[in-house]
Amino acid sequence: MISQLTPILQEHDPDIQNIPLFATAPAFLETMKSTYYGGFEFVWDAVAALAVRVQKYTYYPVMALARFNLYILSWGFLLSPRARTKGKMWWTRPTEVLGISTYFFLYFYVLLWCNVPTWTSRAIFILASHLITMPLHVQITLSHWGTSTADLGPRESFAQRQLRTTMDVACPQWLDFIHGGLQFQAVHHLFPRVPRHNLRRLQALVKEFCAETEIEYMIHGFAAGNGVVLSRLQEVAEQAKMMAACQKHMAETGESGLN
């Protein structure tokens, strides 16, 4: 199978596990089990094949609604055994549950139910307030979807692996508040414990390190980064179309059609 021929990180990295809606590498064009989600099976079927073939065009509409998916993922994680903490950190899970519950109470009850009078107005308010967060979700995907997912094995150093599989987005300092620090994703992967307000200063050191070691540091402007991701989505979509055509030809003729 494709993933056996080309070992990649798709089984372990939740940031690129988006079947049936999106596939960012050819190895997703088959059913796979996620080690991150405890063996959950991402099924490659007719629905996934159709969705991936048009993923370049559904990318922005889906990103516009992605905040609703974050609600599902947040609660799914907090209610799962993976969120349980022991010892001195026992308080983190109940604190996060309390925080999200408070947000839901203030937003959906106090703000939406008590202060917006009609169902039509409530629907418009929900959509408007959630659609405006689309650039944040686009930013998250820019850092992961346009880069390599190949696993080069233990000979590749930690720094090389993180810089090869993650991309940063360049922006002026006064725009940092819009990107929320997510534009420094490669730097964050290298030093995950560094607080967000220090990432820009740390980025300068990473650039120096890459210049000295001749390791590529992928950084693009926001528009260029969108182009990289859209190109990757189109490339994988074309491979999905080719695979479907080959399967159809083999089913009809019994031949691979590769001669």
Image (cartoon, helix red, strand yellow):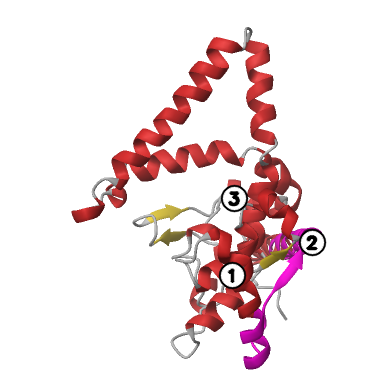
| C-alpha distance separating marks 1 and 2 | 18 Å
Residue type for callout 3: Ala
Nearer to us of marks 3 and 1 is 1
Horizontal side of 63 relative to 112 (left or right) equals: right
Query: Dot 1 surroundings within 10 Å: few (below 14), some, or many (20 or more)?
Result: many
Work out whether 105 lies above or below 214. Answer: above
Query: Dot 2 surroundings within 10 Å: few (below 14), some, or many (20 or more)?
Result: some
- Magenta stretch: includes residue 218: yes
Q: Residue at x 34, y 56 (%)?
A: 38
The residue tagged 1 is 186
Where does residue 5 sit, x and y in percent of width and height?
A: 53, 79
Residue 1 vs residue 133, the one in the foreground? 133
Residue type for callout 1: Ala
Residue 19 vs residue 216, the one in the foreground? 216
Disc with the residue nearer the chain's start (3 vs 1): 3
Q: Secondary structure at mark 1?
A: helix
The residue tagged 3 is 48
Work out whether 190 lies above or below 222. Answer: below
Residue 195 visible in the snapshot: yes
The residue tagged 2 is 227
Question: Magenta residues, as a range?
Answer: 207-236
Q: Residue at x 39, y 41 (%)?
A: 76
Name the residue at the top extreme: 117
Work out whether 77 lies above or below 206. Answer: above
Horizontal side of 153 relative to 57 (left or right) equals: left
Where does residue 211 sit, x and y in percent of width and height?
A: 68, 88
- Magenta stretch: includes residue 128: no
Q: Secondary structure at mark 2?
A: helix
Residues under numbered marks 3 and 1 in contact, where contact means CB atoms less than 8 Å apart: no
Where does residue 97 sit, x and y in percent of width and height?
A: 35, 37
Residue 139 vs residue 197, the one in the foreground? 197
